[in-house]
Image (tube, rainbow, N blue to C red):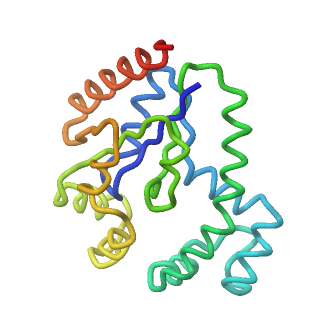
């Protein structure tokens, strides 16, 4: 079974592309969602995050996302420390998930796939791209945030150019119909690659 990484900068539309693959019957693992579930479920992660960020890291047993966001977007060392706590747990959870799948390939959707070296564990990588103004427009609408906050997140991510150079496939996510057509072509290519000995 092939492991296909799916990544892209914030606002590029990874979720839209992931949904298009799911519609084709492909098993998709959304690493950020699984990480959030583990951060709320795992006693070990909870204990370590409270040690790192303090008692307000959780409110009513739920992760205090806005409190933690203030730390990690203003000081990259906090982001690195948090990732060092969460990523190994997500990696082992992913391995268990993969063992239960029976499709020729699975997709692991990760926002910072290249940044954390996750591309090394993938047979193929798909990067989703979109023009900067469109990404900004989507994020301002979706996240009720500011341009400054979006730019801070973008600074912690590789540029599209850098990601494209390291990718096997690139999907330009501008118009939904066109995006679905690109996904279908990549899907066919991946199935073809999986059939080759």
Give residue 40's position: percent from left, percent from top: 72, 62
The quarter holding residue 106 reads top right
Please, is residue 57 above or below residue 183 in the view? below
The one of 56 and 144 positioned closer to us in this rendering: 56
Give residue 115's position: percent from left, percent from top: 45, 61
Residue at the outermost front position:
197
- Residue 73 placement, left or right of 9: right
Please, is residue 130 above or below residue 70 in the view? above
Residue sitting at x 57%, y 81%: 78
- Residue 36 placement, left or right of 159: right
Residue sitting at x 52%, y 52%: 118
The quadrant of the rendering that contains the N terminus is top right
The quarter holding residue 38 reads bottom right
Residue sitting at x 51%, y 61%: 116
The one of 61 and 85 positioned closer to us in this rendering: 85
Please, is residue 149 above or below residue 158 in the view? below
Residue sitting at x 66%, y 33%: 98
The quarter holding residue 121 reads top right
Give residue 15's position: percent from left, percent from top: 41, 44
Give residue 120's position: percent from left, percent from top: 51, 48
């Amino acid at each position: 079974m092939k492991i296909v990484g799916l990544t892209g900068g914030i606002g590029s539309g990874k979720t839209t592309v992931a949904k298009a693959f799911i519609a084709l019957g492909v098993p998709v693992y959304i690493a950020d969602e699984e990480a959030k579930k583990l951060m709320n479920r795992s006693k070990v992660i909870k204990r370590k995050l409270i040690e790192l960020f303090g008692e307000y890291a959780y409110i009513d047993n739920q992760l205090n996302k806005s409190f933690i966001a203030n730390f990690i977007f203003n000081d990259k060392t906090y982001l690195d420390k948090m990732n060092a706590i969460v990523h190994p747990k997500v990696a082992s959870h992913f391995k268990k998930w993969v063992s239960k799948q029976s499709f020729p390939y699975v997709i692991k959707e990760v926002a910072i796939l290249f940044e954390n070296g996750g591309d090394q564990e993938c047979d193929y990588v798909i990067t989703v791209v979109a023009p900067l103004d469109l990404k900004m427009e989507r994020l301002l609408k979706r996240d009720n945030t500011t341009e400054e906050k979006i730019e801070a997140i973008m600074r912690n991510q590789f540029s599209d150019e850098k990601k494209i150079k390291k990718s096997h496939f690139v999907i330009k996510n501008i118009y939904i119909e066109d995006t679905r057509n690109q996904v279908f072509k990549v899907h066919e290519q991946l199935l073809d690659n999986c059939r080759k000995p």
